[in-house]
Image (cartoon, grey):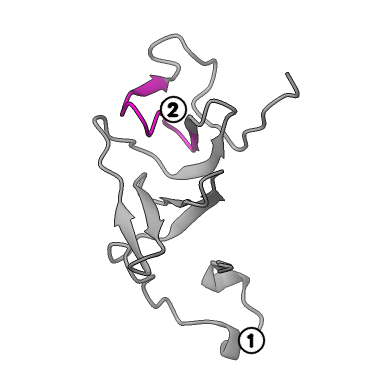
């Protein structure tokens, strides 16, 4: 099966026919929009939200399910990446960088406050070739 997700902010629409007039996204809390989407190597779709929450798309149930995190992300999720070790990296617009190992459940946080970053805005993530 092939899945394709398109999330559009209403202000980017040029035609009324193309917009849903602020209709909520099924599976997300009211008033919370998707801000980052990523499909990992296991074909799991991760959705980060404008409120700092993280969801996974369950293909069997055709629904988004919240990811229970030990620590709370307190800013919008801007980007998501999976590294070669299958760790999920989450960049935020104000709460630094997070990592989540889905196998062990270990979550880590890098930010200005703990000396891990020089700035807490992470707009994109990329992995080098090594």
The magenta stretch is 89-109
Viewer-side residue, 114 vs 27: 27
Residue 74 lies, with reference to residue 101, above or below; the image says: below
The Cα–Cα distance between marks 2 and 1, rounded to whole angstroms, is 38 Å
Give me the disc on residue 99: 2
11 with respect to 110 (left or right):
right
Residue 111 drawn at (x, y percent): 44, 19
Q: Quadrant of the N terminus?
A: bottom right
Judge whether 25 appears above or below 70 on screen: below
Instruction: Specify the label residue 15 is tagged with.
Output: 1
Q: Residue at x 52, y 43 (%)?
A: 78
Q: Residues within 10 Å of mark 2 (few under 14, many from 20)?
A: many
Is residue 106 placed above or below 55 in the rendered structure?
A: above
* Local SS, label 1: loop
Residue at far bottom of view: 17
* Circle 1 Cα neighbour tier, 10 Å, few/some/many (<14 / 14–19 / ≥20): few
| Viewer-proximal residue among 81 and 84 | 84
């Amino acid at each position: 099966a092939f899945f394709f997700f398109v999330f559009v902010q209403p202000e980017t629409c040029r035609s009324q026919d193309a917009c849903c007039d602020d209709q909520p996204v099924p599976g997300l809390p009211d008033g919370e929009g998707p801000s980052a989407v990523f499909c990992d190597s296991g074909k799991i779709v991760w959705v980060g939200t404008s409120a700092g929450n993280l969801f996974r798309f369950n293909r069997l149930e055709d629904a988004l399910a919240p990811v229970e995190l030990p620590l709370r992300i307190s800013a919008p999720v801007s980007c998501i990446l999976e590294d070669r070790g299958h760790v999920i990296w989450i960049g935020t617009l104000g709460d630094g960088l997070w990592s989540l190992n889905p196998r062990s459940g270990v979550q880590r946080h890098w930010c200005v406050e703990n000396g891990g970053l020089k700035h807490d805005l992470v707009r994109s993530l990329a992995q080098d070739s090594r």
